[in-house]
Amino acid sequence: MRYQGHYTDGKSAQRRPAGVQLGSSALRIYGEAGEVLETWPYDGLELLEEVYGRGPVRLHHLSQGNAVLTLDSVEILAELESLSGRRYISHRFFRPGPRTALFAALALAVVVAALFFGLPRLVAPLAVLVPPSWEQALGAKVVEQLNAGADFCDAPAGAATLQRLTARLTGTLQLPYPIVVRVSSREGLNAFAAPGGQIVILRELLESVESPEELAGVLAHEIAHAAERHPLQGLLRAAGLQVLFGALTGDVTALDTAAGQFGQMLVLLSFNRADELEADRIGTGLLNAARIRGDGLLTFLRRIGGESQAGAGLPNLLSTHPLYEERIRQIKALALTEGAAMSARDWRALRDICP
């Protein structure tokens, strides 16, 4: 039997329609023309996240980086388990019946706890309960709303360079979804992370950085926010229990409501001191692991932040944080001082990503 779904190679945001055929030791992924896109052995094949109701089922392979295979329904799981000899017992499957009732009870308990203890104090543990697929869909809607009336810059050479830099910075991360980075023609000196691994760099910021290492530092900082799910936590703080309950129950209308609310506030979102310091620490670690000089982020913070610590017109990673000197000290202590982010040729291509 052939199953239908979509395939993402993990190197771009493109979702390709795909068919899947299960063999004796591996599954094969086919493109629309019937060509073989990938062959994934059952050894190393894993569920990427929990499966709710009738699906979808999202799979990845340990040898395939951030590539993701999404199937439309759960029927494939029984055949997959029979052929592979494995049971995917580390993930929760919520289907109609007693498990659904248990899940509803859990959601109610979470809401009661949030009311009792105060939601802002519980956003980190509550964010863990939000299904990654719901968060990813939310992030895509948020970015779509924020970029309404503008274009994403996608000159091929520049887009390929940005994808390579993103892959390099995320090579050591284990994430429930791929990090997708795009450049927008929308006005503003800014870069931001939306829920679900969506990161947007505005054109003005790309034009303002003076080296590829500065851009790599900004990007690493935003990737760290995404990896720690800080944007989702910010949404929970701002939008409250309606969003949380909608996420836990899979309510699509709540997703649309959340996207509208969060899209309006994202550009002005204030991460707290702990989140910013954590993003700097993790981001600097990503730069170190990728063998990229961390002094680019340091230089950017000093140059842009030093112009006006009041924050008017500055990027989110600066504008809401008066503890500027503390961040400088931490990055300086952690950063390596060797390794280029990219070649001069790639840097020119990236700077020309917007026509």
Image (cartoon, grey):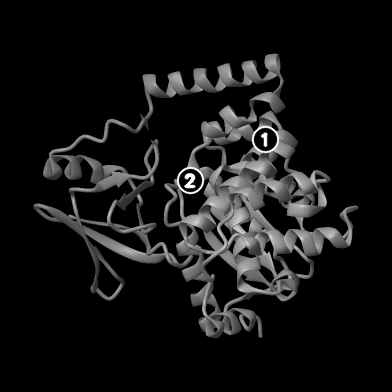
Does 172 sit above or below residue 122? Answer: below
Instruction: List x then y, in percent, for residue 62.
Output: 29, 51
- Dot 1: few (<14), some (14–19), or many (≥20) neighbours within 10 Å? many
In front of the other: 2 or 59 = 59
| Circles 1, 2 touching at the beta carbon (< 8 Å) | no
Locate the C terminus by quadrant.
bottom right
Q: Nearer the viewer, mark 1 or mark 2?
A: 1
The answer to whether 349 is drawn above or below residue 213 in the figure is below
Image location of residue 231, percent across then percent down? 64, 45
Q: Position of residue 345 (x, y in %)?
A: 54, 85
Point 40% across, 41% down: residue? 49
Q: Secondary structure at mark 2?
A: helix
- The 10 Å Cα crowd at callout 2, few under 14, some 14 to 19, many 20 or more, is many
Q: Quadrant of the N terminus?
A: bottom left
Q: Is residue 217 depicted above or below 46 in this figure?
A: below
Residue 192 placed where, x, y %? 68, 56
What residue sits 57% from the left and 34% below the top?
127
Is residue 3 shown to the viewer in this render?
yes
Q: Circle 1 is placed at which residue position?
A: 236
Q: Earlier in the sequence, mark 1 or mark 2?
A: 2
Residue bearing the label numbered 2: 133
Label 1 residue SS: helix
| Observer-nearest of 262 and 302 | 302
Task: Tell me which residue sits at (31%, 72%) in the image.
Answer: 32
Which amino acid, mark 1?
A: Leu
The single residue placed furthest to the left in the displayed view is 24
Please give left or right for residue 327 compared with residue 110 in the image: right
Amino acid at pointer 2: Ser
Q: Is residue 282 left or right of residue 355?
A: left
Which labelled disc corresponds to residue 157? none
One can see residue 267 in this view? no
CA–CA distance in space, label 1 to label 2: 16 Å
